[in-house]
């Protein structure tokens, strides 16, 4: 089993204290978001505003490699980059 103590840098406080705060900050509220989620969302907004962008993105790009073709698809093609049938 991986020893979690190896993952904490030597200049951090003891594991128990770090883990205690992590559990508190990562606990989800009634909306399903944790304090860490809310802080990260706010940081994204601040970074976008500092780059003269709208606070919330207006477009989403999905990498086609991250979406698998459904088992029910009638046509399957050839992916030349992978050199095998998909």
Image (tube, rainbow, N blue to C red):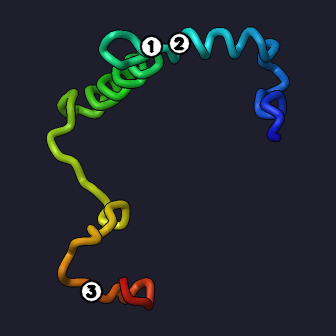
Q: Earlier in the sequence, mark 2 or mark 1?
A: 2
Query: What is the secondary structure assignment of the residue under circle 2?
Result: helix
Residue 79 in the image, given as x and y percentages of width and height: 35, 85
Q: Earlier in the sequence, mark 3 or mark 2?
A: 2
Residue 9 in the image, given as x and y percentages of width and height: 79, 28
Q: Earlier in the sequence, mark 1 or mark 3?
A: 1
Say above or below: 58 vs 30: below
Quarter the C terminus occupies: bottom left
Query: What is the secondary structure assignment of the residue under circle 1?
Result: helix
Name which quarter of the figure residue 33 lies in.
top left
Query: What is the secondary structure assignment of the residue under circle 3?
Result: loop
Residue 64 in the image, given as x and y percentages of width and height: 30, 65
Q: Which residue is labeled 3 in the image?
A: 77
Evaluate if marks 2 and 1 touch, with contact meaning CB atoms under 8 Å apart: yes
At a point 77% along the width and 33% down the height, the residue shown is 7
Q: Which residue is labeled 2 in the image?
A: 25
7 vs 61, left or right, is right
Residue 77 in the image, given as x and y percentages of width and height: 27, 86
Q: Give me the disc on residue 35.
A: 1
At a point 77% along the width and 12% down the height, the residue shown is 16
**Crowding near the residue tagged with mark 2, few <14, some 14–19, many ≥20 C-alpha atoms within 10 Å:** some
CA–CA distance between discs 1 and 3? 44 Å
Name which quarter of the figure residue 4 lies in.
top right
Say above or below: 20 vs 80: above
């Amino acid at each position: 089993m991986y020893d979690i103590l190896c993952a904490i840098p030597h200049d951090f406080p003891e594991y128990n204290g770090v883990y205690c705060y992590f559990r508190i900050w990562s606990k989800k509220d009634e909306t399903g978001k944790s304090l860490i989620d809310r802080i990260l969302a706010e940081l994204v907004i601040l970074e976008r505003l500092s780059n003269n962008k709208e606070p919330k993105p207006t477009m989403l790009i999905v990498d086609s490699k991250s979406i698998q073709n459904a088992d029910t698809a009638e046509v399957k093609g050839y992916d030349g980059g992978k050199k095998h049938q998909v």
